């Protein structure tokens, strides 16, 4: 799990849902870009989390 997601204020079920959403998005990217390496995959997951976590946390307040 991304540290950003792990350390967020999101409830555990929402963290899990967010991880699944990011993984689904990245799987779609991976299907389009077959040479995507694992380091890039993990970096993309972290970058997506940086965008989504603050937005979702803001909506929770």
Image: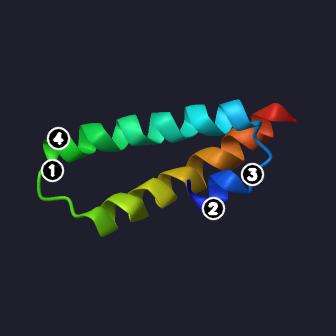
- Residue 59, image x and y in percent? 77, 33
Location of residue 27 by image quarter = top left
What is the secondary structure assignment of the residue under circle 4?
A: helix
Location of residue 14 by image quarter = top right
Q: Of callouts 3 and 2, which one flags the residue occurring earlier in the amino acid sequence?
A: 2
Task: Identify the residue position indicated by label 4 in the image.
Answer: 31
What is the secondary structure assignment of the residue under circle 1?
A: loop
- Residue 25, image x and y in percent? 37, 38
Task: Identify the residue position indicated by label 1 in the image.
Answer: 33
Task: Identify the residue position indicated by label 3 in the image.
Answer: 8
Q: Of callouts 2 and 1, which one flags the residue occurring earlier in the amino acid sequence?
A: 2
Q: Residue furthest bottom?
A: 39
What is the secondary structure assignment of the residue under circle 2?
A: helix
Mark 2 residue crowding within 10 angstroms, few (<14) / some (14–19) / many (20+) = few
Q: Is residue 44 left or right of residue 6?
A: left
* Dots 1, 4 in contact, CB < 8 A: no
Residue drawn at point x = 59 percent, y = 45 percent: 52
Spatial separation of the CA atoms under disc 3 and disc 1: 30 Å
Residue drawn at point x = 57 percent, y = 31 percent: 17
Q: Is residue 9 left or right of residue 42?
A: right
Q: Which mark is residue 3?
A: 2
Q: Is residue 57 left or right of residue 6?
A: right
- Residue 37, image x and y in percent? 22, 64
* Dots 2, 1 in contact, CB < 8 A: no
Spatial separation of the CA atoms under disc 3 and disc 2: 8 Å
Q: Quadrant of the C terminus?
A: top right
* Dots 4, 2 in contact, CB < 8 A: no
Q: Of callouts 4 and 2, which one flags the residue occurring earlier in the amino acid sequence?
A: 2
């Amino acid at each position: 799990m991304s540290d950003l997601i792990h350390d967020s204020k999101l409830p555990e079920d929402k963290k899990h849902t967010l991880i699944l959403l990011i993984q689904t998005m990245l799987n779609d990217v991976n299907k389009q870009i077959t040479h995507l390496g694992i380091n890039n995959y993990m970096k993309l997951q972290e970058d997506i989390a940086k965008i989504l976590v603050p937005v979702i946390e803001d909506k929770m307040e």
